[in-house]
Amino acid sequence: MAATTVRGGDVRGHADQAYLILRTGFVVAPILFGIDKFFNFMVDWPDYLAPWVDRLLPGTAQEFMYAVGVVEILAGLVVLISPKIGGLLVAGWLAGIIVNLLTYDPPRYYDIALRDFGLMLGALALNRLAATGGSIEAGTERTDVPRAA
């Protein structure tokens, strides 16, 4: 079974590397962010909760962040076990965070919402790579890849 190649390298190898980078990032980052929801070492997380969301929920914003921390840790573990499902879970979670940020004192957190949008795209890319086993099918010819002159 020969790998698909393009000028400058092996597409399957590059796809495998991208998959590994995304999978590692989406295991480690949610777990670390989730743990930090309990300690607020990196940032004071309740400060990022839109007031309208806080009003909908029982308890304090910090108590809500404890629940968020648990969800984020679990999301990282799901990515570890099943990156295909975990990628979608993290993408959906990030979509919720984006809505929260866009509706909290506009345009105060638009920069963070844009960053999270990029992360959401990465999580969706992880899902798609996981759907192919982490790599592009061997033996297929890529005609859509630009070739250097």
Image (spheres, rainbow, N blue to C red):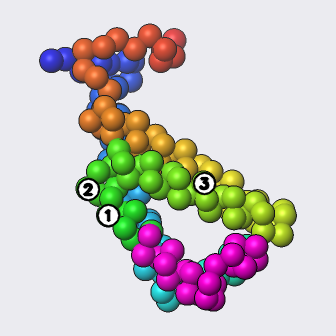
Q: Amino acid at mark 2?
A: Ile
Q: Residue furthest left?
A: 1
Q: Position of residue 92 (x, y in %)?
A: 53, 53
Above or below, 108 relative to 120:
below
Q: Which residue is mark 1?
A: 77
| Label 1 residue SS | helix
Q: Which residue is mark 3?
A: 95
Q: Amino acid at mark 1?
A: Leu
Camera-side residue of 96 and 130: 96
Q: Position of residue 61 (x, y in %)?
A: 63, 84
> Magenta segment range?
51-71
The N terminus lies in quadrant: top left
Mark 1 and mark 2: Cα distance apart in space? 6 Å
For label 1, the crowd category at 10 Å Cα-Cα, with few meaning under 14, some 14 to 19 and many 20 or more, is some
Q: Earlier in the sequence, mark 2 or mark 3?
A: 2
For label 3, the crowd category at 10 Å Cα-Cα, with few meaning under 14, some 14 to 19 and many 20 or more, is some
Camera-side residue of 95 and 43: 95
Q: Is any atom of residue 18 visible in this view?
A: no
Q: Is residue 6 left or right of residue 40?
A: left
| Label 3 residue SS | helix
Above or below, 84 relative to 116:
above
Q: Which residue is mark 2?
A: 81
Does 142 lie within the magenta span? Answer: no
Taking the spot 42% from the left edge, 75% from the top edge, the residue there is 70
Taking the spot 41% from the left edge, 36% from the top edge, the residue there is 128
Q: Position of residue 94 (x, y in %)?
A: 56, 57
Q: Amino acid at mark 3?
A: Ala
For label 2, the crowd category at 10 Å Cα-Cα, with few meaning under 14, some 14 to 19 and many 20 or more, is few
Q: Specify the quadrant of the image occupied by residue 140.
A: top left
